[in-house]
Image (cartoon, coloured by chain):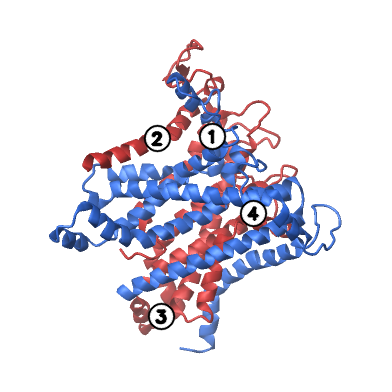
Chain colours: A red, B blue
Amino acid sequence: MKLLRYLVIVVYFGVAVHPLAWMAMTSIKPGPAAISLNAKFVPAFTDQPINPTSIRFNASLDAYRSLAQPKGSGNRSFFSFLGNTIIIATISTITSVLLGTSCAYGFSRFRIPGGNDWLFFILSTRFLPPLAVVVPVLVMWRQFELTNTHLGLIILYTSFNLSLSVWLMKGFIDEIPKAYEEAAMVDGYSQMQAFFRVVLPQATTGMAVTAVFCLISAWNEFGFAMTLNPPVGQQRAVTVPAYFAGLQGNITGVPWPQIAAGALLFVVPIIVFTLLVRKHLLRGVTFGTIKQ
Amino acid sequence: MVDERSTWMKLGFVGPTLLFLIALNIFPLAYTIVLSMTDAEFVGESAYVGSRNFAAVFTEQSYAGAIRTTGLFVFFAVSIELLLGFVLALALSERAGRMPGRTPILLALLVPMMLSPAVMGLFFNLILNANYGIVNQALRAAGLPQPLWLTDQRLKFVTIVMIDIWMWTPFMMLISLAGLNAIPKYIYEAAQIDRAGRWTIFRRITLPMCAPLLVLAVLLRATDALKQFDLVMAITGPNDASTQTLSALLYHTVFRSGKLGLGSAYAIVVLVIVIALATVFTRYIGSIQRRQNGLT
């Protein structure tokens, strides 16, 4: 039995890690080595030319360096797209967590007319494939001149994540005993003060877990990042996924090492954030259906 | 405390979110309904065409094909992810005994679900390339047949399913783990006193106690899989009959063919399916939450 356990983990791990390992390997290759017909998987840390039939390649950090070079029609580097992603994903995550927390508190503590219907409505927005509303969104965004802007994507991503945020936060806030606030209110706090000084500090881990899930989806969103920044426009708010997807079918060849390097840098902030909340992650994915 | 102020306060807490969601969901949907009855395109005047778009939706091959493709995708991807994720969770659960480096292994396994599907889909074009891709080079070296992962009519769909499995099995594992770790120890101890066998314990305790959460996991994943778009775009583009999901079809109709009216009719029909699923989902969560609250 014990052997079987280890076997399952080792085999799955071995397979699952390969695409990532290959990505890391590709990121230190020179361009031609990435698409060589004889696979190259032994990095050689030298400048000496290597026989083309060898399995060795000249390893370097050139791909990472070239990410900083401005390229393409807009003359922008990878880091400007990364900047867009950071601004859009961070602000939309903070907004959806704050709005979600206050809304969850309202539903958790007050008797709200039609409460369950509202909650159902909030959850149902998560089921809607975003592309189903792409036409009206596009029309509205053009009307308000929100296409090609950071704000346009921030508003959209906030609305995509709000339902998840409300439901996760409701699970967390339901578990904070009401007695805490009641005690604070007996001591002369108003309901508002009780919310800010008693409930919010208790809810921070929940907010952090919720933020991870919102961040992952905003960070990686592709459909609207692409459609709201059409190639004919100024493309001021192109995020990394939209930028990389646009490199497919590049006439000068797809710059694989740069893509690999960029993709790895791109996931680092998410990994770091996930590490920070790792202890509470399990609690977060269960929608408050499990008490631990 | 039931006075004017508390009504305003309730509104202050829940109002902004509700307004936001109404503005960004109800209004666009109403507008979609209006558009779905016109022949609108990106430029020029549009005219009312009644139910013609809906008639087209149900008679056109592409729509039936997209429903079928999406259904198959959701079914295969989600069921395999569930199976793999649950088995992994069993192997990694605390009850299965001590394991050195459990947390680092767990966290490393989670990495694929943090990656951008659009970017990873692009990178799989390199990994799975028929000639210089590493997978086929390895197969060639081993003397095995080298399938055309990205271009074979049937295989492309399987390829997309496999990438999705690679990315989302960790999520299933995470939820399964939460379920397994929440089963109280004393139940297992009682079973051992009764000399229940391994298989009986699994079938009578582990599985039923995890089941509610597994259903939840399946529903969560299914709603996401239903929206599958990024991988399809990366591997085949939006207009490939063998991989065209509903989202890809919507995108193609609106942005490549420029038919806003027809696209909107598609969206409305998708919405009906979605509402049915959402109803099942919320009822389900509600019932487990009530049961949990009843227990504690």
Residue at numbered disc 1: B123
First along the sequence among labels 3 and 2? 2
Q: Position of residue B244 (x, y in %)?
A: 63, 45
Three-letter residue code for mark 3: Tyr
Judge by depth and name the residue closer to the eye, B279 or A50.
B279
Checking the image for residue A15, the label placed there is 2
| SS at badge 4 | helix
Q: Residue at x 50, y 61 (%)?
A: A164
Residues at marks 3 and 2 on the same chain: yes
First along the sequence among labels 2 and 4? 2
Three-letter residue code for mark 4: Leu
Checking the image for residue B165, the label placed there is none
Q: Position of residue A168 (x, y in %)?
A: 44, 63
Q: Is residue B198 left or right of residue B82?
A: left
The chain under label 2 reads A
Checking the image for residue A189, the label placed there is 3
- Disc 3 crowd rating (10 Å Cα; few below 14, some 14-19, many 20+) is some
Is residue A205 at all visible to an observer of this figure?
no
Q: Residue at x 51, y 12 (%)?
A: A52
First along the sequence among labels 4 and 3? 4
Three-letter residue code for mark 2: Val
Within the image, what quadrant is residue B293 found in? Answer: bottom left
The chain under label 4 reads A
